[in-house]
Amino acid sequence: MTELSKSKPETQSARPALYEVNKRDFYIALFGAPMLTALLFFWVLLIPVFAVLFGGVPWLIFGGPALWSSLRKHGPGLRLLRSAFVANLVGTPLVVAIYVLFDARPDRFLKELIESMFVVAFGCIFSLIWATAFWWIFHLLTKRR
C-alpha cells in the first residue's frame, strides 16, 4: 500500500504572503504619531494636545492592531489611513456606548450618547491625521534601511 502523501501534488497556500514589519519602527511610529501632531499643531487652541489626552488610549487599543494587521497584509501603503479610520469608527462608539451605559442614569442614556458623538467626530478627524503621521514616520524609518 502506497502512502497518500506521496501521491498528492503540492499545492500553494491560498493565503497571501505577509509583509515583514519591524516592531521597533512600528512602535516608534505608533507612539510618535500623536506626539508629533501635538507638538506641531499645539498652537491651534491646544486641540491636538487634548486629542492626545482623550484619544491616546483608543488609538493604542483600536488603532494599533488595525495598523499592524494592515501593514502585515498590504504593506506600508495608504490603506493604513482607511484601517485606522474604520478602527476608530467602529471601536470608539462601542466604548462610548458601554461607558454611557454603565455611567449615565437610565433617563439620560440617549442624551449622553448623543453628546458623546462629538468626541467620536473629533476622533474620526484625528484618526486620519494620526494615521497619516504614522505612515510618514514609518515610511521614513523603513526608508533608511
Image (tube, rainbow, N blue to C red):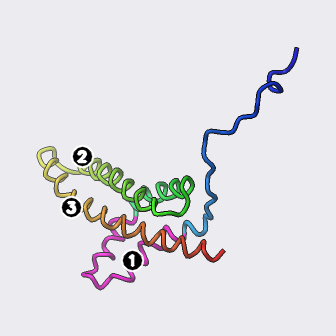
Q: Which residue is mark 2?
A: 101
Q: Which of the labelled discs sits on residue 37, or is there none?
A: 1
Q: Nearer the viewer, residue 110 or 4?
A: 4
- Amino acid residing under circle 3: Phe
* Secondary-structure class at tag 1: helix
- The answer to whether residue 21 is magenta is no
Q: Position of residue 91 (x, y in %)?
A: 36, 52
Q: Position of residue 111 (x, y in %)?
A: 13, 52
The residue lying furthest to the right in this view is: 1
Single out the mark in the foreground, 3 or 2. Answer: 3
- Amino acid residing under circle 1: Thr
**Residue under the image location 58 percent in, 69 percent down:** 25
* Secondary-structure class at tag 2: helix
**In this image, 137 relative to 93: left or right?**
right
Instruction: Say whether disc 1 or disc 3 marks the residue closer to the N-terminus.
Output: 1
Q: Position of residue 137 (x, y in %)?
A: 51, 74
Q: Main secondary structure of the magenta part?
A: helix
Quadrant of residue 121 in the image? Answer: bottom left
Q: Which residue is mark 3?
A: 118
Magenta segment boundaries in residue numbering: 28-56
**Residue under the image location 31 percent in, 63 percent down:** 123
- Amino acid residing under circle 2: Leu
**Residue under the image location 46 percent in, 61 percent down:** 80
**In this image, 127 relative to 144: left or right?**
left
